[in-house]
Amino acid sequence: MGTLDRFDIKGRSALVTGAASGIGLAYAEAMAEAGAAVTLTDIDAEGAEREAARLRAEGYEVRAEKLDVSDWDNVAAAFDAHDKAYGGLDICFANAGIDTGAGFWNPAGHRNPEGQVDTYDHKRWDRSIQINLNGVFYTVSNAVRIMKKEGRANGRTGGSIVTTASNAGLVTEPIVGLPYMPAKAGVLHMVRALGLELAEFGIRINAIAPGPFVTNIGGGWLKKDPVARAAWDAIVPLGSVAETDQIKPLALLLASDASDYMTGSHVVIDGGMMLGKYK
């Protein structure tokens, strides 16, 4: 097999959570563009169907499902529907996540009264953990259930699972809401544990840990506030916050056989943010 052949995912199927916008949509586009049949799932059912319809109009094999990753039964049903539609599952992106509100500092470096541990709304904490950590477990568990099935229509076993973590799961980010950091750290450790567990089944699992990307998270403030965008661009060593298209090649690497010797790993994509400031 040639080097470029290892990136070929034609004839495979993929399910992406949180795929109506942002990084999840970029994952779904990358899979479709590379030849996979894709299910876009999102709690925003209209958004997922709108993007699926756009991709179908461009000639790709795509479908959409409404999915609340905090609801186990809903997750299981979405995976069963994908399995019925495509005869198995080869690739899964456990991507859905939410913004948890401001951290204990605001971007200007002042204390944020609502972000302190002693004032943090416990309901916000619970919601963040439920979506950002439990939702990943629900997604991965059901992906594995389908990937382990025998006699799949496409004749393959195993598969590739990719979770969306964050560099906030690796370092302290004081402007990020408190529960987001342990949730993403939990995702990273889950990936390490499951890399070992799933290896004998030929199922690989890896994480992408993004830094600052322009998405709708947090109300899409990096799209709307040019001052904030300029401030973030100024502190990224490579010069700017990333657009979601820039994550597509990494997504294809981890989804395809090009990464067939990688499991239990994470890849940081943050423009050098974790290397420290130099400006």
Image: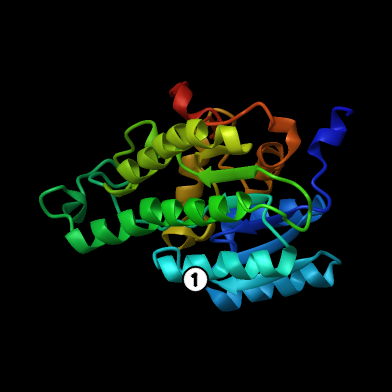
Q: Position of residue 122 (x, y in %)?
A: 18, 59
State the scheme by which the image is colored.
Answer: rainbow
Q: Secondary structure at mark 1?
A: loop
Q: Position of residue 4 (x, y in %)?
A: 86, 33
Q: Residue at x 75, y 71 (%)?
A: 54
User: Which kind of residue does numbered mark 1 sit on?
Assistant: Ile
Q: Position of residue 72 (x, y in %)?
A: 41, 65
Residue pushed farthest left?
Answer: 118
Residue where numbered disc 1 is placed: 43
Question: In the figure, 264 relative to 34: above or below?
Answer: above
Residue 189 falls left or right of residue 151 = left
Picture quarter containing residue 46?
bottom right
Local crowd size for mark 1, using a 10 Å CA cut-off: few (<14), some (14–19), many (≥20): some
Q: Looking at the image, which is closer to me, 126 or 240?
A: 126
Question: In the figure, 51 relative to 132: above or below?
Answer: below
Q: Looking at the image, which is closer to me, 137 or 154?
A: 154
Residue pushed farthest right?
Answer: 2
Q: Residue at x 45, y 27 (%)?
A: 274
Q: Residue at x 73, y 51 (%)?
A: 30
Residue pushed farthest bottom?
Answer: 46
Picture quarter containing residue 252?
top right
Say which quadrant the N terminus sits in: top right
Q: Position of residue 108 (x, y in %)?
A: 31, 44
Residue pushed farthest front?
Answer: 151
Count of labels in the image: 1
Residue 152 seen in this snapshot: yes
Picture quarter containing residue 47?
bottom right
Residue 41 seen in this snapshot: no
Q: Looking at the image, which is closer to me, 147 or 178?
A: 147
